[in-house]
Every structure is written in structure tokens, then in C-alpha cells.
Image (cartoon, coloured by chain):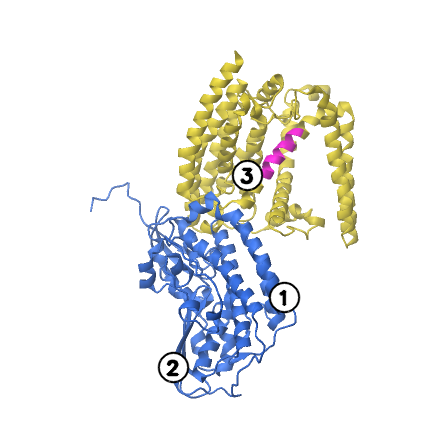
Amino acid sequence: MEIVFQHPLFKPLVLTAVLICAFPLLAGYIVLLERKLLGDFQVRLGPMRVGPHGLLQPLADAVKLLTKEDTIPGDADRTIFWIGPVVSTFTALTSFCVLPFSSLVHVADVNVGLLVILAMSSVGVIGVILGGWSSNSQYPLLGSLRGAAQLVSYEVALGLALVSGIMMAGTLSLVEIVRAQEARQVWFVFSNFGLMIVPFVVYFIAATAETNRLPFDLPEAESELVAGFHTEYSGFRWALYFLAEYANMFVVSSVAVALFWGGWLRPFPSAGWLELPLNYGFPALLFLGSGVLCVPMARREAVRWRRNFMYVVGLCLAACALPFLFPPVNQLIIGVFWFVLKVAVLLYVMIWMRGTFPRFRYDQLMDIGWKYMIPIGMGAVLVNAAVGMLLAK
Amino acid sequence: MAEPTFLDSTEMVLNMGPQHPSTHGVLRVILKLDGERVRGTDCVIGYLHRGLEKIGENRTYAMYVPYVDRADYVAAVSNGLGFCLAAEKLLGVEAPPRAQAIRVILAELTRISSHLLWLGTHCLDIGATTPLFYTFREREFIMDIFEKYCGARLTTHAFRIGGLQYETYDEFLDECRSFCEWLPPKLEEYDRLLTGNRILIGRMREVGILNAEDCKAYGVTGPMLRAAGVKWDLRRAQPYSGYENYDFEIPTGERGDTYDRYLVRMEEMRQAARIVRQAADSMPDGPIMAKVPKVIKPPAGEVYVSVEAPKGELGYFVVSDGSTQPYRVRIRPPSFVNLQALDRMARGALVADLVAIIGTIDIVLGEVDR
């Protein structure tokens, strides 16, 4: 047995299996979160029927999508039609292998981690293009053309924004980038007199465009192209595109967190006295509070099993507080906690943007990409390089 | 003409509609596209044709009133008002002052409700999903007033030839007043969310320009005409139902683009609320029905009566042969006439603009197809 645990492939394989199994479920709950938040922005409740407060909605959606008839248009190029969603999902999930969830929890610490993610997101768009083109239908074709154009314009800005962060860290490995922030005792977004906020904003806008989210969801612009590149997809194939989109959201947010927001580091990493309240008190209170808040929600449920379900959810949430109180366990999981919390904040901002903004037009998108984002990104590289050199001396 | 090269793109024909999220019902537009550029549009209508005009020839005048509500079903009250006015003109009667004031209140509430629906769907067309839910919340208030007044929410059949069937319910005027107080803050909320939004301005400015000459040439009326700078409003130009007694502004635009039309409609909602408030404050007492014979049998003749519906000039041309049924009813629907200008506005625009332009015309297919 010992030889199995000590094997260098053990951790990566187990983590990969966990990620691949857990992420579809997690994506389902990100969707539920999105629908609930949008409901809140739009003066309505969001899903309420399947389980109390729609808590079982993701499972119902998954079952529906898996059992739905899978149609392929008659004139479609069947092979490419088949490959499209696979490419998208594969690349999106592959990016997970270099994400640094904490100093211990990461599948692989590759010395070109950021490049892997950039490469995967570039290849991922091929899935969009292939899917749209092979459908042999006009709306998907327009959608995939837009996707290609969008990729070309925003990949450059995205890269330039990342360069600023890489300069600060001096490495491309995501784990090492967070370690560099640990060594400097500061999140990169606040260093260089706050100048690093500029590349972060450029990165975040470009990443939103990269993941086809509103206000940049042109490839699937619902009111223009019906459903854009995946108009002809149904059932499980469509679910794969959907999964890829949410995986990409998670990945770009994770990169932003690792590169700019300190990865698994807690807020104010330089202030040692905050260790206890932030690393122990905050997560414990957060989970305990969520658990307690489930009680009034459960009381309002009229049906008995729904009420009990809500109590169980509350109990589970409250129980999550316990591990954070034991120092040895806390050491293991606190990094993942901060990382996921920061990613969740960025996801919230993305959903918030979706609830607020209208969609850009094709040419306006290009204008912003080429005339604003790329020059600003370049300027940020130069300024941050200069400031960083002065500070280093 | 230069020689064609391999770089020239071929024209793509895209059949948009009748099932499409943003053709507002069952409009079908056959697009000729060069990439994303629209090279030509061809509207195919008639998917909602119900023979509304022909039905009028087989119904008595009173029986036909609920039918016209189904033309522009999001502004049913204005349709009913137009036809009742036409029948009254044929008969030579006029609704009593109280009935006229109540008609004005209901018609202006309908204008607000129609514009709210337009705002929500127009924002949805250009990608903003949230305003739709806000506008439906406000619209619900109006629907409740309608429901309490006459039992129906959408196709109200609120008016009768010669006046009104129902006296108002007890809190009617108070509810109208409280709505008028409630609406302006909500409109300010929309202003904060939308009016200054750079993305929204970018999507609307200089999109779908239709200048005053074009508007007149196409017969375009309503907010689209006013956004082109023409101060033409039938409520002011040829007042009916006592509109001359109320004080209101006619908002106009300058450039005649989508953004101007947006601003004009937003301001029209405020002005409509002003009219409702004035009418509620100066509500006369008295009967609500003029003396109309039991069997409506207008003398032979013909009339054309038009009202300022939320979408433009809504006209009814009614020919009577002296019998109990109209000899011919011709409806001049504003949506149908305004839709003609689509090709003019959309040529050379992008697909995304086309969607915004269809939204800004504010069509209702029930009225286009009749």
C-alpha cells in the first residue's frame, strides 16, 4: 500500500478523478447560483420548485439533459459535429490541471502553467468554430465566425495583461506565482502602488470576452442568432458546451485569483495577528452562519420533506465549520477555502455584469479590443515594468 | 464594376423568423447578408392574419368592438377608443364628459403599459435582460387597475359606443393618482440603469436613422416621427375625447435614431402620467353613457377617425350602408405602416442593429397582420 501512496502519480491521479467527477456537479450549482442571483437582480425568486429553494434543480437539469433526444441535423458534418463539443470540454477541463487550489492541492505544478491555460483556451475556441461550422446552418455559422474574431482580438489583450503579472512573479508556474506573492507578503493587485489594478481590469474584461459571457456573448447572442454556435445542438452535446463554458469561467477566474488576488493566501498576508480571526474565525463563522440562516428558510417550507431537507442542508453547512477549528486540518484546507472564495467573488461579478449590461455589437467589440484593451495592456506592461524596477532597487 | 475576385464574399440568405426570439411575434424577415452586413430585407407578414377587417362586415357595431382589441393587443384600450369614436361619429353622438375623462385615463395608462412593454423587450433585444422584469412589475399595476375596472387585463373591451358600460370602482381615481406618483421614480431608476449606459448608447446612437422626410414619405407616425423632430401628435393636432383640456408636452428628438426614439418614448410615459393625474383631478360628475339607440343603425355614410395610439396614428375608416352592420371597416394600423420603413433603416446595418431596429419600430404582429 505504502508504495501506492508514495507514487509520484498518486496525487495527480486522485485529484484529477475528483475534479472530473466533482466539476459537473459544481458547474450545476454555479448555474443554480447564477439563476438565483439573476432572480434576485430581476425582482423574482429564481428556481423554487425542484427541492426547497431549487436546491435539487441542477440534478434535475442533468437528468433531463442526459435523457433528451440527441438530434443531428441531416446535412451536418457528423464527425466534426461530434468532435466540436468534445474539444471544448476537453480543453476546458484540461486547464484545471495547473490550477493551484492551495500549496498542497494542485494536480501538477508545471513550469509553463499559464501558457498551458492560454493554449487550452485558444484551442477551446476551435470547438466553438467547428461546432458552428459543421452544423451547416446559418445562425451557427455566424456565431462561430464571431467566436473566431473575438478570440483573435481578445487573446492579445489577455496575454498582455498576464505579462504584467508574470513580470512581478518572474515565473510562469501558477504555484510559483502565488509563492512569489507569499514571499512579498502582498497580493499582486495591490503592489506597484496599486498600478497592477490596471492589468487586472484588462485581464478581467478580456477574460469575460474569452468565455463568451455578457456583455460579450456575441457567439451565442440569443436575441440575434437564436443560440449562436450551438443552435443545432441538443441534449448531452449541448450540455458539454454548457459545461465547457462554466469550466472556462472557473478557470479564468482562478487565473485572476492566482495571478492578482493572492491565490490561496488570506487577506492581509503581511499582518500576522490576523491569522487567528481570518483563518479560523472567518470560515467557521461563515459556515455556521449559513447553517443557522437555513433554519428560518426551513421553517417557511410547508411540505414536511422539504422542511427536513432544508434542516439537513443547514446542518451540513454548520458541520463544515468544524474542520476549520482544528489546526492540523485547518492547515490543509484553508488554502482551498480562500482560493474558492475568491473565485466565487469573481464569478459573482461576472454574473452581476450579465444582469446589468446590454450586449456589445460586433464592430464595437473589435473597437474595444484593438483600440482600447491592447494599448492599455501594453501601457500597463511598460509602466509596471518601470515601477517594478524602481521598487526593486 | 470591378472584376469579381475570390475575395468577394457571396451573399447569404438568412430566414429570420417567424420563430425567432426577437421578431416580436411572428414577423418573418428574409435577410440578404454579406457577412454580418445587411444588404436587403424582405418582410413576410400574415402569420397572424385573422381577417379582422372582414369580420367587421359580419358583426353589428356593438359586437365588433371587442374584436378590435385583438389588433394591437398590448394597447387594446386605444384600439377600442378609436373604433368607438368612429362609430359615434357615424351615429352623430358624443360621449358625456365624465366618460371622456375616464377614457383618457384608461388610454393614457395603456400608453404607459405599451411603452413599458416596448422598453423591456427592446432592452432584451440588445442583450439587457433585467429591465424586462422591472417593466413588467410596473405594468402589473396598470393591469390590476384594468382588471378591477372591467374584469379583463389585456383585451379589455373597456368602452362602449356612446360612452362606458361601467362606472368606475370606488378607489379608481386614488389608484390612478398613486400610480402616477409611483411611476416617475421608477423611470428614474431606468434612467440610471440604461439612459447613460455607454454600451446602450453605443448600440442605439446613429442606428436606424429615419429623418423627417423619410418618415413623411413612408407615412411613419407616432414616436418614430416625433423622434425625427416633427412635433406631430394627434392628441394635439386634432384633439379628440377632450385632450384639448389637458396640459402636456410633445417630446421630440433631433436625429431620428434609435436612441432618440428611446428618449421620446421614455418622456412620453412621463407626460402620459401627467395627463392621467390631470384627468383624475378634474374628473367631472355626470352620466357615463350618451343616448344611443338599443339597435345601432347609423345612417349611410363613411367616416375616418384616427387616434394617437401608443405606436402612432391608428385610424378606422368605417363605411355604413344604413344597416346594423358596417359595410366595410378598414383599419390603419401604425405598426404595419411603420414596419415599411424597416428596409430603409436596416440596409447597410449589422445583424445586431437589425434586431435593435425591429425593436425600436415597436411592432405588434396582431396589428400588422390583422
Most common SS among magenta residues: helix
Q: Nearer the viewer, residue A37 or B251?
A: B251
Q: Position of residue B110 (x, y in %)?
A: 52, 65
Q: Is residue A365 visible?
A: yes
Chain letter, yellow in picture: A
Q: Quick one: label 1, few (<14), some, or many (20+) residues within 10 Å?
A: few
Q: Which of A312/B146 is in front?
A: B146
Depth check: B42 or B282 in front? Answer: B282
Residue B190 lies, in percent from the top left, at 53, 51
Q: Is residue B313 left or right of residue A53?
A: left
* Range drawn in magenta: A338-350
* Chain under numbered label 1: B
- Helix, strand or loop for disc 3: helix
Q: Give me the C-alpha separation between circle 1 and circle 3.
A: 54 Å
The residue lying at 27 percent from left, 41 percent from top is: B6
Chain B tint as drawn: blue
Residue type at mark 1: give it.
Asp
Mark toward the start of the polypeptide (1 vs 2):
1
Q: Are marks 2 and 3 on the same chain?
A: no
Identify the residue at image location x=51%, y=68%.
Answer: B107
Q: Residues within 10 Å of mark 2 (few under 14, many from 20)?
A: some
Q: Which chain is indicated by disc 3?
A: A
Residue A232 can be seen in this image: no
Residue kind at label 2, given as amino acid type: Glu
Q: Which residue is mark 1?
A: B174
Which percent across, then down, holds residue A276? Answer: 75, 24
Q: Secondary structure at mark 2?
A: strand
Q: Secondary structure at mark 1?
A: helix
Identified by mark 3, the residue type is: Ala
Quickly name the residue at label 3: A244
**Where does label 2 land, which residue?**
B302
- Where is A63 relative to A380, above or below? below
